[in-house]
């Protein structure tokens, strides 16, 4: 459902460094329906707190490069949702899958092949329960290393039930890697997952959200 809305690109957003970047945004009405008639004046882009100029806005039509991270404690709770998402985006995206059960494991590299995708989805079904020690921050960091590709919109989807292991990885380094990758990240958590202890409790503390 997260991709039901059109993705807009603020094409030619001029940054303070003089570099032109493409910024993606989903635009929805209060009832969740997509809005398609928008103008550059209805967007604002800031870098370092300073407004940047926008040269144009259009509906994005580039293919998606989607990496799905499943941190479900081995319950298989997200298997059907992942299947439906990939069915909905068939022909418009390539996918990678990572399972976080203790340590993170990439179980499917980027592909658009239906047979390989089906085999990958089978691997995120019920696979034994395990509480805690789930290295989610490390999985996100690893996924960002190859999520970008020329001519494709990188998207990182994190599906989690909570109780991940606290990480020594600074939250700021993960946020910076996300920024540099140009990826859009979505996090879907079960109700109550945000009551868990912070993923990282140091100077740059990051909550489970």
Image (spheres, rainbow, N blue to C red):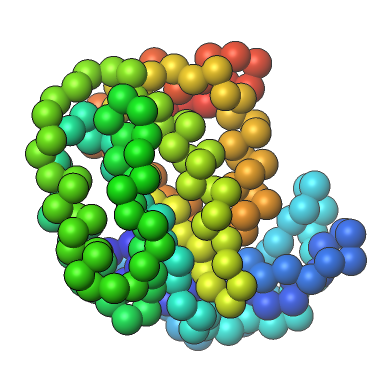
Residue drawn at x 78%, y 48% is 49
Q: Quadrant of residue 1?
A: bottom left
Q: Whole-percent x and y of residue 154?
A: 51, 63
Q: Relative to residue 94, is residue 146 drawn left or right?
A: right
Q: Whole-percent x and y of residue 55?
A: 75, 80
**Residue 165 in view here:** yes
User: In this orientation, which residue lies closer to the viewer: 67 or 43?
Assistant: 67
Above or below: residue 205 compared with residue 152: above
Q: Whole-percent x and y of residue 63?
A: 46, 77
**Residue 38 in view here:** no
User: In this orientation, which residue lies closer to the viewer: 55 or 162?
Assistant: 162
Report the quarter where the C terminus lies: top left
Q: How many marks?
A: 0
Above or below: residue 78 compared with residue 164: below
Q: Whole-percent x and y of residue 90?
A: 28, 76
Residue drawn at x 58%, y 67% is 149
Q: Quadrant of residue 54?
A: bottom right
Residue drawn at x 82%, y 53% is 50
Residue drawn at x 59%, y 37% is 174
Q: Relative to residue 185, is residue 83 drawn left or right?
A: left
Q: Quadrant of residue 14?
A: bottom right
Above or below: residue 39 compared with residue 154: below
């Amino acid at each position: 459902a997260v991709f039901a809305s059109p993705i807009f690109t603020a094409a030619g957003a001029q940054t303070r460094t003089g570099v032109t970047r493409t910024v993606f945004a989903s635009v929805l009405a209060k009832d969740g329906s997509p809005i398609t008639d928008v103008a550059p004046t209805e967007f604002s882009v800031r870098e370092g707190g300073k407004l940047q100029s926008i040269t144009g806005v259009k509906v994005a039509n580039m293919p998606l490069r989607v990496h799905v991270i499943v941190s479900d404690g081995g319950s298989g709770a997200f298997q059907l949702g992942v299947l439906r998402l990939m069915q909905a985006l068939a022909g418009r995206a390539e996918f990678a899958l990572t399972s976080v059960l203790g340590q993170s494991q990439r179980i499917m590299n980027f592909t658009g092949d239906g047979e390989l995708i089906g085999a990958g989805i089978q691997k995120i079904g019920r696979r034994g329960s395990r509480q805690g020690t789930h290295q989610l921050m490390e999985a996100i960091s690893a996924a960002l290393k190859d999520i970008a590709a020329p001519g494709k919109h990188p998207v990182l989807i994190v599906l989690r039930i909570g109780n991940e292991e606290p990480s020594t990885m600074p939250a700021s380094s993960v946020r910076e890697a996300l920024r540099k990758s140009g990826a859009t990240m979505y996090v879907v958590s079960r109700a109550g997952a945000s009551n868990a202890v912070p993923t990282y409790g140091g100077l740059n503390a990051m909550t489970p959200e």
